[in-house]
Amino acid sequence: MKAAIFFERDGVLNLCETRHGHQVVPLRLEQFKVNPVASVLLHQLKLAGFVLIATTHQPAVARGDLSRNELDLMHMILRRKLPLDDIMLCPHDDASHPCQKPQPGMFLEAAFKWSLDLDRSYIISDKWQDAKAGQVAGCTTVMIRSPWIGDDHHDFVVDDLETAVAKIGLLQNNLYGREVAMA
Ligand SMILES: [Zn+2]
């Protein structure tokens, strides 16, 4: 079984402005800006053998503010610029939906689809919903400091995507060291 890195899309893989304390998510293609540091970092993780999966909740689709076509174009760009294996999408505007984070449905579905070991997988996000879902799914959560990480469970808090990836590298090395020590 493989290990994955799950990335929250908005604010991690693509840049988002903050307005009135809220993250402004892109509704049109020209507003969609891929995080310029993401490409190099994701290629490093890919070389380390991880399955790379973006996860995203886009309730604006259900509300009719974001066309599915526009969203598909954004994701085409994301896949072209970053070595992602998959993009998991919840387009629903209904908190009871099992694929809507903080419910772990998206991660469980990905685990089934990609034969993943969630215990060895990581989530990188700037939102508490991922920390909560990750706790239930059994992933290690690396949170990028933001006004939205909350006070509940998370495993690590870092300043940015670079540090998040470095942290995972460090944890992997420690894990490896332990395995060698036990052998
Ligand atoms: Zn959904």
Image (cartoon, grey):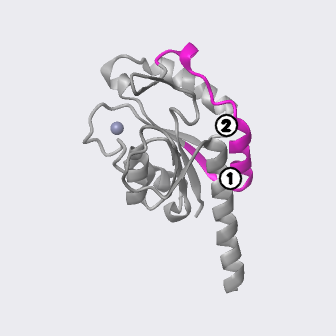
Q: Nearer the viewer, residue 21 or 126?
A: 21
Quadrant of the frame with the N terminus = bottom right
Q: Disc count in the image?
A: 2
Residue appearing at x 39%, y 22% in the figure: 20
* Residue 16: assigned label: none
Quarter of the view holding residue 39:
top right
Up the image or down, 101 lies above or below 172; here it is: above
Element type at marker 2? helix
Give the magenta-colored segment's residue range: 27-53
Amino acid under disc 2: Ala
Residue appearing at x 60%, y 60% in the figure: 2
Image x and y of residue 63, in percent: 31, 21
Quarter of the view holding residue 177:
bottom right
Split into quadrants, the picture shows ligand 1 in the one at top left
Q: Disc 1 beta carbon < 8 A from ligand 1?
A: no
* Residue 38: assigned label: 2
Q: Residues within 10 Å of mark 1 (few under 14, many from 20)?
A: some
Amino acid under disc 1: Ala
Q: Hey, which residue is sitting farthest bottom in the picture?
A: 183
Q: Nearer the viewer, residue 56 or 116?
A: 56
Q: Nearer the viewer, residue 180 or 170?
A: 170
> Which-is-in-front pick, marks 2 and 1?
1
Element type at marker 1? helix
The residue that disc 1 covers is 166
Quadrant of the frame with the C terminus = bottom right
Image x and y of residue 79, in percent: 63, 32
179 drawn magenta: no
Q: Of callouts 2 and 1, which one flags the residue occurring earlier in the amino acid sequence?
A: 2
Up the image or down, 87 lies above or below 5; here it is: above
43 drawn magenta: yes
